[in-house]
Amino acid sequence: MADLTTDFLGIKSPNPFWLASAPPTDKEYNVRRAFEAGWGGVVWKTLGSEGPPVVNVNGPRYGAIYGADRRLLGLNNIELITDRDLFTNLEEIKRVKADYPDRAVIVSLMVPCEEEAWKAILPLVEDTGADGIELNFGCPHGMSERGMGAAVGQVPEYIEMVTRWCKQYYSKPVIVKLTPNITDVRKPAAAAHRGGADAVSLINTINSITSVNLDTMSPEPSIDGKGTHGGYCGPAVKPIAMSMVSEIARAQDTAGMPISGIGGITTWRDAAEFMALGCGNVQVCTAAMTYGFKIVQEMISGLSQWMDEKGYTDTSEFVGMAVPNTTDWQYLNLNYIAKAKIDEDLCISCGRCYAACEDTSHQAIAMSDDRVFSVIDEECVACNLCVNVCPVENCITMEQMPVGAIDPRTDRVVEPEYANWTTHPNNPSATAAE
């Protein structure tokens, strides 16, 4: 049987599924229910320092994006960090960690970008017995206007400076949570690494407005006729998150740096994909808010079964396995050639492949008078659009042409793989370089 026990920064948990810092981890009651349901760890909802209280809105806090079947694809969140008393939170964290010593408890923090503020709060957190801290440098709304959250996460120098303070005044692991609201996520990750961070977590939410109420003419969620930008999360952000994770995993400055993956993780497969791209564990929020805490049981059983089928006995065996196969475009093999194939036994004659290819692609699918669809190899560029729009799984597949075959589209021989774009004959600079 696969062992899902995870050792992340020396912090052990029974499985790699942690709840992210968010409404589900706002209080002791929620966290206890989460642990009873089977979650391996939690990142407690972000705490602030003593001072003026945080005041959240008392109207709607979430906007939503739905699929055609009203499946929740994304949430826009305008909630701030915890509005509960700091010392109440600290007492609850201490009790929870004492009662669940085998679970990971990480404390998310966001305080002003001043050394004394961090120096004051870190000993209080350490006294709780929590396993580590996560620096919230990602929140894109409310707190960023106060010079915290994403306002810090967008300035690498600030990230490095605050991380150094935390490593100086705190003895346990420091995780830096990165904002996706930046051009190149590798720069803040490298800054965290220079500052001594033990790991990074990403992505935090994406700055967004999900919809506008066309009756009141205000963004949703609307508070007394006004709306604002918020943080976008949920399944829709997964592709963005995985791309950013992969950039950090293969960047020279951060290669090998532990990563906690966040962003749209809803199933065990999502988690496995993040881990294959270099994440030692994953954090979940929207899926728990949509389906409840017990969704983790499906994640645990699914990942365990998949690992058994693949022969993995420990999660560390496949963490990062996809990183060497993630590359820049110029290193792709331009001599790899495939063609679409339609299984007529599975085809339901809906015509979606034909319409998509004929109207918007390469006119590579023919339709007979009796609605039988076939691929015109001479026109097919293997763009994969037909596969993606077909409603029947495996009805259309892409089949690689063997080396030595003649590509009917170009009448060229399919050649072996070139090392990279630099030596490829299609590269106009290759001949000049020679």
Image (cartoon, rainbow, N blue to C red):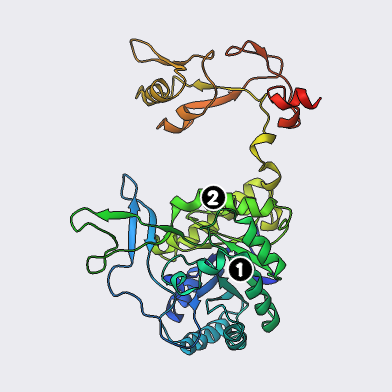
Residue located at (49% from left, 53% from top): 267
Q: Residue at x 40, y 81 (%)?
A: 54
* Residue drawn at 47 percent across, 20 percent down: 362
**Circle nearer the N terminus (1, 2):** 1
- Looking at the image, residue 26 sits to the left or right of residue 62; the answer is right
Q: Amino acid at mark 1?
A: Val
Dot 1 surroundings within 10 Å: few (below 14), some, or many (20 or more)?
many
The answer to whether residue 220 is above or below residue 355 is below
Measuring from the top left, give residue 129's x and y in whole percent.
61, 84
Q: Would you say residue 261 is visible in this rendering? A: yes
- Position in image of residue 330 (x %, y %): 67, 35
Indicate left or right for 393 with 369 as reference.
Answer: right
Helix, strand or loop at label 1? It is strand
Q: Residue at x 58, y 53 (%)?
A: 244
Q: Quadrant of the C terminus?
A: top right
Q: Residue furthest left?
A: 215
Query: How many tags in the picture?
Result: 2
Quick one: label 2, few (<14), some, or many (20+) residues within 10 Å?
A: some
Residue 20 seen in render? no
Question: In the drawing, does residue 282 fall left or right of residue 141?
Answer: right
Amino acid carrying mark 2 in the image: Arg
Q: Which residue is mark 1?
A: 176
Instruction: Name the spot of residue 158 as percent of width and height, x first.
Output: 61, 70
Q: 217 left or right of 353?
A: left
Q: CA distance from mark 1 to mark 2?
A: 25 Å
Instruction: Give residue 186's mark.
Output: none
397 versus 211 height, above or below: above
Quadrant of the image occupied by residue 17? bottom right
For numbered disc 2, what is the local secondary structure?
Answer: helix
Against 45, residue 212 (above or below) is above
Residue 269's mark?
A: 2
Snapshot quadrant of residue 106: bottom right
